[in-house]
Amino acid sequence: MNFSSYKSADPQYFNSLTLAGLASGRACSYLDIGAYTGDSLHQLMAHVEVGQAVLIEPDRNNYLTLCSGLARLLPDNPNLRPLALPIGAGSEFNTFILSGNGEAASLSNLDPKWIQSVKSEPNAMPQTIVTVPLDFVMPVTSFDFIKIDVEGHDLAALSGIRSIVTRSRPVLAISLHHRLRDLFDLPLRLAEMLPSAGYHYHICQHMHNSFVSVLYAIPLS
């Protein structure tokens, strides 16, 4: 009960843990899985110079807002090289239904019976997205900072960037509160992916009652 009322004094994602783990003297390369409207990119840019930024956001409305925001950022940030992709990150190639709006959007499996039922009502078709393992999309790209927040599919997204993570040895910030098992599964999967890389692991609760809990993995210098 005492821990349920605890709230970390550090900001979410970009704080004394993660910023200290970034290399100084060069622009940060950033992968944002679940970029929403680009709010996290803005927060990171308030602390460090960002060069390459790959932003993954499957929701069409969020994606359009994200692209509009990037267009406004570019004139004042000539070194920023953004790439926004309207896809989902997963452990395999698949298609899902995207339900809900904004930050509360979530994925669910396509139901063949449901597909048949909406053929007669095309306007009732909700948004569908394709998920891909990002290792296949970016087979040689490396990143300094990777953030994952995809409303319960965080483990699948992490599994799909195994090669990127082992190649990059980045700072990681992974949302930990969407599913109960994530508290165990995500740290174990990450430790399996980086068995000898040398990392410090931290879990911070940024709101009360486990909400906005984040797993941070900081490479040892």
Image (cartoon, helix red, strand yellow):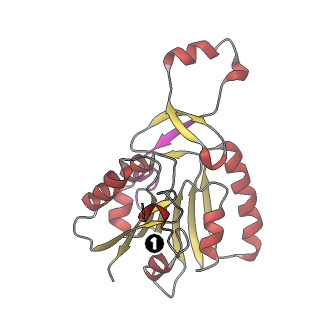
Q: Is residue 116 left or right of residue 183?
A: right
**Which residue bears the numbered disc 1?**
144
Q: Is residue 141 visible?
A: no
- Of the pair 155 and 92, the residue shown nearer to us: 155
Q: Residue at x 69, y 76 (%)?
A: 78
| Number of numbered markers | 1
**Residue type, numbered disc 1:** Asp
Region in magenta? 129-139
Where does the image place residue 73, in percent across and percent down from the top left?
73, 69
Where does the image place residue 17, in percent across and percent down from the top left?
44, 77
Quick one: quadrant of the C terminus? bottom left
Q: Residue at x 50, y 18 (%)?
A: 112
Above or below 99: residue 181: below
Q: Residue 130 colored magenta?
A: yes
Q: Residue at x 60, y 43 (%)?
A: 105
Where does the image place residue 130, in percent across and percent down from the top left?
53, 38
Above or below 2: residue 159: above
Q: Residue 78 colored magenta?
A: no
Q: Residue at x 27, y 74 (%)?
A: 198
Q: Residue furthest left?
A: 196
Above or below 187: residue 153: above
Quick one: quadrant of the N terminus? bottom left
Indicate the quadrant where residue 54 lies. bottom right
Q: Residue furthest bottom?
A: 25
Where does the image place residue 181, in percent across and percent down from the top left?
35, 47
Determine whether the residue tagged by mark 1 lies in a helix, strand or loop. loop
- Of the pair 10 and 50, the residue shown nearer to us: 10
Q: Is residue 32 visible?
A: yes
Indicate the quadrant where residue 38 lies. bottom right
Mark 1, Cα crowd under 10 Å, few <14 / some 14-19 / many 20+, is many
